Image (tube, grey):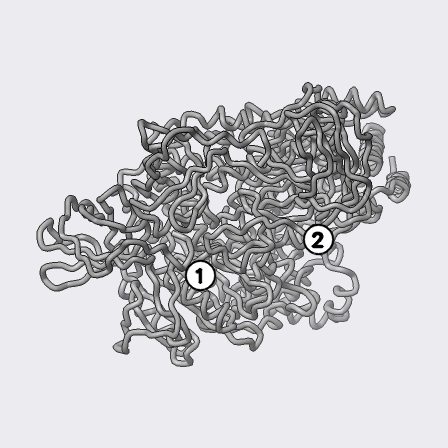
Amino acid sequence: MGAAVTRAPAAGPAPEAARVLRVAGPLVEISCPAPVAMHDLVELGGHRLTGEVVAIRGDTAAVQAYEYTGGLAPGHPVEPQGRPLSVRLAPDLLGGVYDGLLRPLAGAGDLLLGTAPDAGPGRRTWRFTPAVTEGTRVTAGAVLGGIGAGVALRLLVPADVSGEVTRLAPAGEWGADAVLAVVGGHEVRMAQYWPVRRPRPVARRLPAEVPLTTGQRAVDLLFPVARGSTVAVPGGFGTGKTMLLQQIAKWCDADVIVYVGCGERGNEMADVIEELAELTDPRTGGRLAERTVTIANTSNMPMMAREASVYTAATVAEYFRDMGLDVVLIADSTSRWAEALREFASRMGELPAEEGYPAGLASRLAAFYERAAAARVLGGATGSVTVIGAVSPPGGDRTEPVTAHTERFVRCLWSLDRDLAYARHYPAVSWADSFSRDAPALAAAHARAGDGEWAERRGRVTRLLAEADRLADLVELVGVTALPPRERISVLAGRLLREALIQQNALSPADAYSAPEKTAALVEAVLTVIDRCAELADAGARVEDVEGVDFTPLLRARETAGPAQTAPVAAARDTVLGLLKGVPV
Amino acid sequence: MSGPADVEHVEHDEYVEYTDVRELRGPLVVVAGVRGVGWDEFATVALDSGERRHGLVLEVDRDLAVVQVLEGTAGMGRAGTRVAFSGTALRIPVGPGWLGRVCDGRGEPADGGPPVLGGSYAAVGGAPINPVRREPPDEPVLTGVGAVDVLTTLVRGQKLPVFSAAGLPHLELAVQIAAQATCGGEPFAVVFAGMGLTHADAAFVRDGLAERSAARDLVLFLNTADDPVIERLLTPRLALTVAEDLAFTQGRHVLVVMTDMTAYCEALREVSAARGEIPARRAYPGYLYSDLASLYERCGRIRGRPGSVTVLPVLTMPAGDITHPVPDLTGYITEGQIVLSAELHATGTYPPVDPLSSLSRLMRKGTGPDRTRADHPAVAAQLIAALARSRQVRELADLVGRQALSPTDLPHLDLEDGFRLRFLAQGTTENRPLDESLDRAWEVLLTLPDSQLGMIPAELLDAHRPPRNEERDEERYEVQEEEREEAR
């Protein structure tokens, strides 16, 4: 255990042993003659089930159990651990799959029988390269050396330690638990422990203004997100939430991905795990799995571990951020997390607020999203944690408490639309109901990076889509033939934008990921064609002739061009412009 | 209710019967003076009349135990009720001995046979499959129902519900699938769990599945509408426990059909209300999602083991409302849905599967070359897209008239009829081979010109479109006209 975590045992005579008093599913009431603190860990019964103290009244305490409590009976022994719920942070997290308490699932059996799979010391070693020399004075967060993993990691001075480096291991291969340095009397290892409910400190927060490229055009173009920002993705079932989040986990340009499957499907998790292991990271050439930490807490695993899993994930994300990395934390789904809160509050007999959720729901959500940040880390580098949380509104009802509160706390909202999904338009990000409060800052960032047109392009696409939507309602009533020529071109423009640009085929190797230059090329191509169509209509061409032009090359350009290619897009544009020349005026 | 098979057993005496009943409320009995009784233990309740009932411990508080009685508390009083605790969670014998048997909702034989015995026992709560040990599903279960096999292919290890409404033939469809399903010649079995069925429905299920039962490929659990409501909480768990053993120990592919899940959820709500829990949507308990997940998530495949558990829950949406908590939460857990439509049913079409709102999320991996047929994914995608267009065109034609349609829209106008008559419609006992179903899908699609079939690769199109022969087209058109006439 790290020094920050352990409390000294209470002095005095040995207290009477703590006992179980009451068991109702995950809620266990215990007698605790010795003092316990809120959020302390306890071990319950002969099977040593892990639980956390969540309320104390007199000399009894309420515990939320993270495991199945079947068979636990009043009178069974309880052992307070004297420390809060903490997790072991080490380079070997990368590429692994863990449960909600960050215990590796790889070593557990086919069925999870309630006894915790234990994190044994791994045999794996990493290349350590010292960056300082013995005798240097260092402060918290300073870089002691590099760790060669799939992602470039660093050995840092722990947050509450500073002083002279009195010992430093030579360059070489070391295990995660080997002492690599001694700083001010503290031993420093690659592996360290941190309490999950306490955010890891940073030197200061920075404004989020560097774009995170997700490779999804609907996002990068219309509702972009900055590194260190927050996103909520609400969508009813079947709208493709998980698919979109998986695409982002695979292709976004972060250094590390922490993916939490929180109360979701087992087969889906199996699929993610398998795909990440097979796919190659286009940036490093390694496996995508090697930059990913997967936390799999499926819907049939113990419910309260769901509650802990988002904090576990945030802690892991912060650990990598502190090394100066950009981390994306994806939580699917925060609604299941909120349900665990509700379930437990109900068993505790708390007064319910909206729809049975506890009154603290809004502040808990806000606090969770606040663990996202772009920051100057203690060591002086910059790093970020971007949080993307899925929301599953019951009945697709966006006014339900989790969705309604989450919307207030996030900077971006990618709202998934059932009608788009039913029309097999993926990703089904609604352009009418989504927002990005990062867009102005990112427009400035793009301008600084030499793309001054970015904001203008985004604005035009948004306006055209809105105009086409407005006309679509009219078309349903009167038919497209009843519209004036200019409006008919707007309807055509909407279709071209949707099919050639916004839609994206997650299953096609060419289209699953779209680099910024390809996205820009597609926007330019579609807008140029639309402009040309409008000019033809203004010049008196028959709209039927314009509509009858074969736009297929343009519609297929996103598939014919590779993920970062622009020339095939330009060629498709020119083909269609050539066909438009043939329209009689 | 999920959890491990072995339950802690400390300072507990199996032969003690507790008689200090403090309270009886709905299906619950509160017993005082108990010692060492664990949560989720199985209990036996003896009545004065000599009747024995069964229960589960919902809560233990110091010396009080709250027991939910599966058969209900009717006829029980504070005096004369004796409760004994088993020291473990409810466990049942498992093994191939269940095959060919018909039981009630508690697993007691209803076929006149002896009680089912097995070599080993398993806890009915099951245990979660380790996500890293799961094998992603990628092989089909063929049902012999064209609409399901082609458009919403059921994949081994999937959970795919049927969303229905009162008056629709979901039970016919469930029985047909249970009677016909196969896994390409590999060892296969069906476990059918009926909850809250009327006696007529139960008889229909028994008759429809008699052949499969005689072949010892089927286990039938039937809880009828007049059986104890709380028993329904147990029925699907028994079915899944038996299925898991058949799959992961005996190496069979097992299809578990559970109908009607709405009746199950109502039983859950009743217990929740009796316990005075804080209600969530429509007074269903807040843990409805987790409880349903503890059933549905028991499907799957495990790496290195030959069998699979595929789950097909059937539920009726109260008042046809898909946002009702039962279909809504089910939809969030399952991998797609088969939606039955009242409009299609009104046209006399069976099965009335609505192709546009139905979806099998795992279909992509379970279809195609080496799985079903090379043309299957493209044909299914194109048929859905064409039907979506067809529906739009029809709505437009209703509003503005046929003459306002563009030339590309016109051929779509009649596609939906062709789809219904040539592809969808099928007898309730007709076991249609996949090849025939796919050929019928082609037949419907080929009424459209090539330019409207952009989702099908050109080489597939060439292979399937018959050479131009106007006489044949003429003939086919006449046949279709006749059939349409008949349908009217």
Q: Left or right: where does residue B380 sit relative to residue B191?
A: right
Q: Point out the frontmost of discs 2 and 1.
A: 2
Q: Residue at x 48, y 25 (%)?
A: A362
- The residue depicted at 60 percent of the width and 72 percent of the height is B436
Q: Position of residue B77 (x, y in %)?
A: 11, 51
Amino acid under disc 2: Ala
Question: Left or right: where does residue A514 sit relative to residue B395?
Answer: right
Amino acid type of the residue tagged 1 in the rendering: Gly
Above or below, B466 against B89 in this view is below
The residue carrying mark 1 is B348
Q: Is residue A60 above or below residue B367?
A: above
At which x and y percent is residue B167? Answer: 36, 56
Q: Nearer the viewer, residue A500 or A136?
A: A136
Helix, strand or loop status at disc 2: helix
Tell me if I can see residue A541 in this picture.
no
Residue under the image location 54 percent in, 25 percent down: A367
As measured in the structure, the alpha-carbon distance from the residue carrying label 2 to the one carrying label 1 is: 49 Å
- Identity of the residue drawn at 50% across and 59% down: B299
Quadrant hosting residue B173 = bottom left
| Residue at the far front in the pictured view | A13
| Location of residue A172 in the rendering, given as x and y in whole percent from the top left corner | 81, 44
Q: Which residue is mark 2?
A: A277
Pick the residue in front: B443 or B97: B97
Discs 2, 1 touching: Cβ within 8 Å: no
Q: How many marks?
A: 2
